[in-house]
């Protein structure tokens, strides 16, 4: 008897009435990450030299073959050293799906995510006449420090699944904010999956497989692929640059700054929902950069807009990149050395009552605007924080930002990311218990 024949039918296995094997049958026999033999010739799927605990900083080398542990106190992909590539998917639960369907999907996703981040395919193929369990495009690829981070959107807690009593009070849709013109096609979502890796194929593969497992229960709401990380999340790494050509995230919260992480990133006892303690809130903003306009601006004005030297990254008040900006310093004619509307001034924690967030964004491009012939690209801004009010305060303070002439926020979403898991635990357990 095959694993498929042996697996009993369960309510919600095939909610849309689709023909073919269910998610649970596809994953039957997969077990926890680390299952050894995979049918169909997929053994040795990834190279997996080693692993480190989830949510911790790596060594200076950050070997691209390194596997980041799925289990840990916090979800990986937040404080983990930022990888080179991103695949971010926001998904919506389809009409007619039941509470049990969502619960079972989150359990199946846990199994699949644990396997993929350990360098395994999502499950075992036992039926040659059924669709393959894994889509297979990443066969032979390195695991490339893949992390998969899950988030719950505010809409997941509406009337559909009986979760209203589990909704955190802070998890609400963001209010209208300065300099935004949101595209409805890039907003919201019941669930989000953030996959980060040093290999773009591996990151895409993770989101694709989870969406495939969810067929009949969830569907794509929107998706973004990112390249070129725009923030350093750990010390000892060179600050990356965004599409403006400036270093980005010099003063970002770093994983090694545990007191700042506890104060500004990890949800603690202040939450009204104990299940979220140890988790974090994720805010995603798609920010269009009008690069052609920026590229025509002269260098000194670019530096005045940002408040830093373009090549050195040093604040205009003097010093080197990591010198603290002196917002009281004056320059020519007694004017502020860092202009009053410079981005670094208005975004600084000194200007915002000490408020900080952990930035983890990526550059993106969606091709060319067919009407204007200009680049559709910019910053896919991702930030983690213990309360979305932190982002709202910062973004409100940027209403007068000189950079607003060159950018516009076109997409937006907020999610609650639960804490990490121990082996044997699954996403959704705390919600559906």
Image: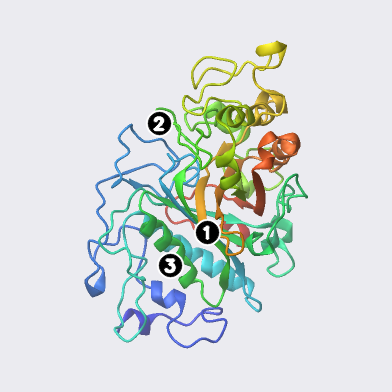
Residue 123 visible at all: yes
Residue 366 circle label: 1
Depth order, front residue of 271/368: 368
Name the side, left or right, on which 38 lies relative to 426. Answer: left
Q: CA distance from mark 3 to mark 1?
A: 22 Å
Q: Do residues under tags 3 and 1 come within 8 Å of each other at their CB atoms?
A: no
69 versus 224 height, above or below: above
Percent across and percent down for residue 317 are: 60, 16
Q: Quadrant of the N terminus?
A: bottom left
216 versus 284 height, above or below: below
Q: Nearer the viewer, mark 3 or mark 1?
A: 1
Q: Residue at x 73, y 64 (%)?
A: 158
60 versus 283 height, above or below: above
Percent across and percent down for residue 346 are: 69, 29
Residue 329 visible at all: no
Q: Residues within 10 Å of mark 2 (few under 14, many from 20)?
A: some
Q: Do residues under tags 2 and 1 come within 8 Å of each other at their CB atoms?
A: no
Residue 237 circle label: 2
Q: Residues within 10 Å of mark 1 (few under 14, many from 20)?
A: few
Q: Nearer the viewer, mark 2 or mark 1?
A: 1
Percent across and percent down for residue 313 are: 50, 26
Percent across and percent down for residue 407 are: 64, 45
Q: CA distance from mark 3 to mark 2?
A: 31 Å
| Residue placed under numbered mark 3 in the picture | 209
Q: Nearer the viewer, mark 3 or mark 2?
A: 2
């Amino acid at each position: 008897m095959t694993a498929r024949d042996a697996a009993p039918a369960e309510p919600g296995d095939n909610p849309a009435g689709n023909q073919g094997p269910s998610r649970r049958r596809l994953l039957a026999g997969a077990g926890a990450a680390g299952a050894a033999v995979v049918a169909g010739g997929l053994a040795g799927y990834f190279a997996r030299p080693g692993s480190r605990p989830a949510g911790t900083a790596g060594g200076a080398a950050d070997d691209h073959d390194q596997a980041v542990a799925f289990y840990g106190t916090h979800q990986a992909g937040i404080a983990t050293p930022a990888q080179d590539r991103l695949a971010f998917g926001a998904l919506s639960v389809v009409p007619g799906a039941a509470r049990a369907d969502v619960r079972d999907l989150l359990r199946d996703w846990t199994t699949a995510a644990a396997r993929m981040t350990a360098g395994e395919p999502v499950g075992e193929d036992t039926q040659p006449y059924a669709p393959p369990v894994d889509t297979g495009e990443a066969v032979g690829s390195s695991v490339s420090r893949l992390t998969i981070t899950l988030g719950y959107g505010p809409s997941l807690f509406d009337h559909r699944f009986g979760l209203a009593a589990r909704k955190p009070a802070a998890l609400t849709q963001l209010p209208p904010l300065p300099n935004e013109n949101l595209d409805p096609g890039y907003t919201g979502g019941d669930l989000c999956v953030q996959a980060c890796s040093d290999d773009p194929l591996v990151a895409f593969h993770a989101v694709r497989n989870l969406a495939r497992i969810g067929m009949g229960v969830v569907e794509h709401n929107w998706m973004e692929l990112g390249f070129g990380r725009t923030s350093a999340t750990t010390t000892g790494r060179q600050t990356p640059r965004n599409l403006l050509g400036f270093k980005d995230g010099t003063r970002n919260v770093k994983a090694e700054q545990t007191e700042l992480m506890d104060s500004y990133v990890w949800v603690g006892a202040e939450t009204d929902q104990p299940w979220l303690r140890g988790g974090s809130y994720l805010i995603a903003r798609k920010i269009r950069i009008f690069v052609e306009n920026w590229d025509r601006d002269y260098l000194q004005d670019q530096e005045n807009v940002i408040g830093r030297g373009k090549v050195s990254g040093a604040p205009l008040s003097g010093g080197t990149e990591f010198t603290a900006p002196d917002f009281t310093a004056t320059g020519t004619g007694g004017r502020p050395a860092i202009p009053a509307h410079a981005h670094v001034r208005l975004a600084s924690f000194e200007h915002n009552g000490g408020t900080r967030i952990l930035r983890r964004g990526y550059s993106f491009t969606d091709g060319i605007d067919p009407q204007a012939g200009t680049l559709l690209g910019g910053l896919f801004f991702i930030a983690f924080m213990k309360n979305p009010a932190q982002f709202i305060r910062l973004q409100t303070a940027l209403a007068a930002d000189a950079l607003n002439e060159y950018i516009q926020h076109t997409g937006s979403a907020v999610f609650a990311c639960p804490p990490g898991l121990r082996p044997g635990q699954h996403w959704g357990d705390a919600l559906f218990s």
